[in-house]
Amino acid sequence: MKYIELIFQAKEEEARKHLVVVKPFSLEDEKDSEHAALNVIRRIFSLLKDVRPGSDLTDFTQLPPQLNQPRSQLQVYGEMIYSFGGQDLLGECSRRVLPIERLKSVVTWNISKLRPIIFGLAPYNPILGETHHVSNGHINVLCEQVSHHPPVSALHATHEKENIDLTWVQYFTPRFRGSYVEVEAKGKRVLKLLTRKETYEMEQPKLIMRFLPAAGGHWAGKIKIKCPETDLEAELHLNSGSFMERLRGNDNRSIKGKISESSSGNKLYDIFGHWDRTVMATNMKTNEVDVIYNAKDNISELKPPIVKNQQEIMESESAMVWSELSEGILKKDWERAKKAKKAVEEKQRLSSKLREAAGESWVSKHFLVVKDGKDWDCSPLQPMVPRAPLIITEPH
């Protein structure tokens, strides 16, 4: 009898630990992407027909499963850090000997986080307390949804071998502009090279989802990177391209910028290229030109995480929270997907009501969360992110 009970417990545990982790969207996947089709655009406009231009879309989350990617926004954030091909660009930031070379590496790593956008399909809005924990080599990444209304995500990543610490807090304001949606991302992004005793503060670009006259998603705006300890900074400008430029195939994803001394403004490097192809840096003293980034080497043929340790997977793991919905979307079983999405949302609403009835506030498990007016800040509760039960590769 005890043996039968153990079997049932094992089956329940296996069901509870069911995960669905999909492959990251890679550079080569764009060739097969059909998400800008007219039926998608019509569906989007039908959802936005009563929304006025300039309106805040933060709470506009009731998308049908047909307009969802089979992944949570937390996974999208995490992929920017742990999902890459070829060289470990994050670790390279600390390996460089000269301060100027380290800043160039930080610039290169920032460019590598720019990924193609799937137009017309949105990731799931994470539930409160949802987590995503993945390791790739020496890089360990932990994300947590620390607020649901408004949606705020926190990320902590550490590089075990190179003693690097990265913290993000991300919250955004999507606004409907008539022919496009503008998503302004806010929150601190801080990269610390602990061995070098250097801190790099980084800004975030905007995301533009355009419907007319040509549909597509593009990164735009400015990225500024500053290191007070070395008196060096970089400024990058992303160009999403005008309608006519996109028709001609010109500068759709161009990037231009510079590396300078903060105090004097003296320009040391000129940066130019395309973030989905190659980016170059010209030394202003020697006029030498180096390729500092090759997108094909870094964001092609990306692999999904695999389960390394089933027992250590948290119940809050994103790939488990949304597994039923993701399977429904992948199999195009829209009725199953609709029920699964409703079940997750209802469970979250019930948890919120129970906390409210008990007079309790939700507390983040992995971050100290501070809200100051409309601004948010998050500090990791642990100095190092532990090895994750989901991995891309083992450390060398």
Image (cartoon, rainbow, N blue to C red):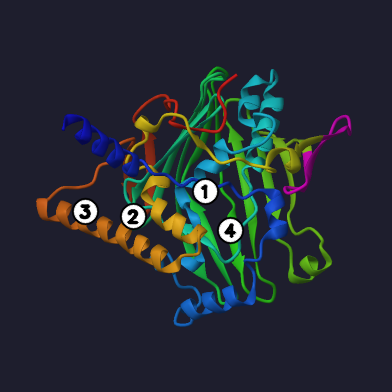
Helix, strand or loop at mark 3 = helix
Q: Which residue is mark 2?
A: 148
Q: Position of residue 25 (x, y in %)?
A: 61, 50
Location of residue 297 with respect to 117 vertically, above or below: above
Helix, strand or loop at mark 1 = helix
Task: State the separation of the CA atoms marked 1 and 4.
Answer: 14 Å
Q: Which secondary structure dominates the residues rendered in magenta?
A: strand
Q: Position of residue 187 (x, y in %)?
A: 46, 47
- Residue 202, quarter of picture: top right
Type of amino acid at the residue the image marks with label 2? His
Query: Can you tell which of label 3 and label 2 is closer to the viewer?
Result: 3
Q: Is the residue marked by circle 2 packed among few (<14), some (14-19), or many (20+) residues within 10 Å?
A: some
Could you tell me which quadrant the C terminus lies in?
top right
Taking the spot 53% from the left edge, 74% from the top edge, the residue there is 44
Q: Are marks 2 and 1 in contact (CB under 8 Å)?
A: no
Query: Which disc number belongs to residue 181?
Result: none
Taking the spot 57% from the left edge, 66% from the top edge, the residue there is 120
Task: State the separation of the CA atoms marked 4 and 3.
Answer: 32 Å
Q: Which residue is mark 1?
A: 76
Q: Which residue is mark 4?
A: 207
Name the N-terminal-most of marks 3 and 2.
2
Location of residue 131 with respect to 393 vertically, above or below: below
Type of amino acid at the residue the image marks with label 1? Val
Type of amino acid at the residue the image marks with label 4? Leu
Q: Is the residue marked by circle 3 packed among few (<14), some (14-19), or many (20+) residues within 10 Å?
A: few
Horizontal side of 150 relative to 264 (left or right) equals left
Can residue 113 be found in the magenta stretch?
no
